[in-house]
């Protein structure tokens, strides 16, 4: 490789790197993370009534809450909460994990979680006082079921199985282009200068 072509090769390699892509993290949340409308904060393992002062089969939602959140009910009374995530413009989704912060799913077979009508897993709490325990359901690998507008729903096999959802969250890894560095125009100018220099050198030799 001669002295002219080597800098050109390095410049071309730099241009190729600049146009590549990387992964970026995006988090989308539906619900206001207000401890089921009770205010304050709560964590996994808290008991909805005993620790937090909540009452079963009570609606703590406000007009700004997505329908089905902050409302202790059943699949028969609520129809099961269904929240919609707008994925327009987030880019190509490489992987996605769904998180659901809830309390009370202890009876029957728990809650069947569906994304756009396809079952992706279940959430259920076990152990003492599980009927009122706060828990976080985590379901990975849901990227294949997502679309521009994605609906996430929870239903239970038992109509009397009361539960409440505070919020749902999608953690996404998306393909994102690497920003063009500010020095790229300078690199292009240097590249053109090297080409012109090479041509003049060949002309002088002729």
Image (spheres, grey):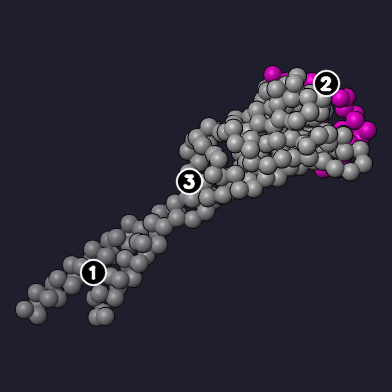
Image height check: is 142 above or below 30? Answer: below
Q: 147 or 63: nearer the eye?
A: 147
Q: Can you see residue 187?
A: yes
At 49% from the left and 55% from the top, the residue drawn is 22
* Residue at disc 3, secondary structure: strand
Residue 42 forms part of the magenta stretch: yes
Residue 92, numbered label: 3
The majority secondary structure of the magenta stretch comes to loop
Q: Quadrant of residue 73?
A: top right
Q: Position of residue 64 (x, y in %)?
A: 67, 22
Residue 194, numbered label: 1
* Residue at disc 2, secondary structure: loop
Residue 206, numbered label: none
At 48% from the left and 44% from the top, the residue drawn is 91
Q: Quadrant of residue 153?
A: top right
Q: Quadrant of residue 160?
A: top right
Q: Quadrant of the N terminus?
A: bottom left
Q: 149 or 3: nearer the eye?
A: 149
Residue 58, numbered label: 2
């Amino acid at each position: 490789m001669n002295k002219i072509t080597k800098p050109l090769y390095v410049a071309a390699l730099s241009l190729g790197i600049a146009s590549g892509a990387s992964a970026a993290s995006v988090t989308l949340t539906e619900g206001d993370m207000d401890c089921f409308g009770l205010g304050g904060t709560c964590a996994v393992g808290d008991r909805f009534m005993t620790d937090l002062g909540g009452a079963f089969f009570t609606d703590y939602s406000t007009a700004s809450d997505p329908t089905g959140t902050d409302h202790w009910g059943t699949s028969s009374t609520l129809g099961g909460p269904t929240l919609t995530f707008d994925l327009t413009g987030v880019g190509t989704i490489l992987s996605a994990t769904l998180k659901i912060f809830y309390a009370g799913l202890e009876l029957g077979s728990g809650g069947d979680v569906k994304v756009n009508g396809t079952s992706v897993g279940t959430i259920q709490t076990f152990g003492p006082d599980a009927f009122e325990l706060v828990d976080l359901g985590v379901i990975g690998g849901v990227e294949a079921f997502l679309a521009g507008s994605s609906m996430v729903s929870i239903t239970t096999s038992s109509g009397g199985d009361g539960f409440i959802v505070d919020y749902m969250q999608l953690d996404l890894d998306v393909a994102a282009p690497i920003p063009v560095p500010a020095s790229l125009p300078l690199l292009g100018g240097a590249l053109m200068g090297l080409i012109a220099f090479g041509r003049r050198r060949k002309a002088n030799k002729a």
